Image: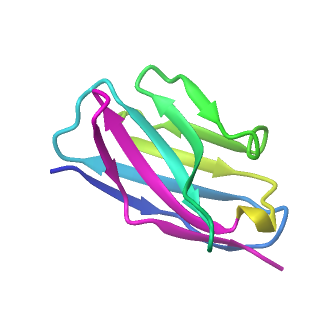
Amino acid sequence: QVQLVESGGGLVQPGGSLRLSCAASGSIFSINTMGWYRQAPGKQRELVATITSGSSTNYADSVKGRFTISRGNAKTTVYLHMDSLKPEDTAVYYCHISWLGSMNYWGQGTQVTVSS
């Protein structure tokens, strides 16, 4: 069983910063991709950023230059550093891990609200 536990969400003013953390535990294949997705009210869940076990990254166009995804030294933790936050970044952010094309797991989600 794989578990993903997120932390770091909250309320921040426009232009502010937040860092999300996600710790994965359980039987995890060493070659994997971890990432962050988000879902705003009334919208579909969308990709924010991903990082492979080889540290290759991918970002949604809407967050390029503002968000940075990284892994911890243990490779089972992933971070999302968010700068220059905008009201449209408001959403529930979900951590995700996948490997072998068919195994994938989600965290429970953490709320990020950008508002003055």
Q: Position of residue 2 (x, y in %)?
A: 21, 49
Magenta highlight range: 90-116
Quadrant the C terminus occupies? bottom right
Is residue 31 toward the left or the right of residue 45 in the image?
Answer: left
Q: Is residue 112 magenta?
A: yes
Q: Nearest the camera: 27 or 44?
A: 44
Q: Position of residue 25 (x, y in %)?
A: 24, 48
For residue 98, side relative to residue 26 (left or right): right
Left or right side of 54 for 93: right
Identify the coloring: rainbow
Give the quadrant of residue 109. Answer: bottom left
Does any portion of residue 103 appear in the rendered image? yes
- Residue 87 lies in the magenta stretch: no
Relative vertical location of residue 39 with respect to residue 61 in this rendering, above or below? below
Prevailing secondary structure class for the magenta stretch in the rendered image? strand
Residue 18, percent across and down?
Answer: 66, 60
Near-viewer residue (77 or 3): 3
Residue most extreme to the top: 54
Identify the residue at the far bottom of this view: 116
Q: Residue at x 62, y 65 (%)?
A: 43
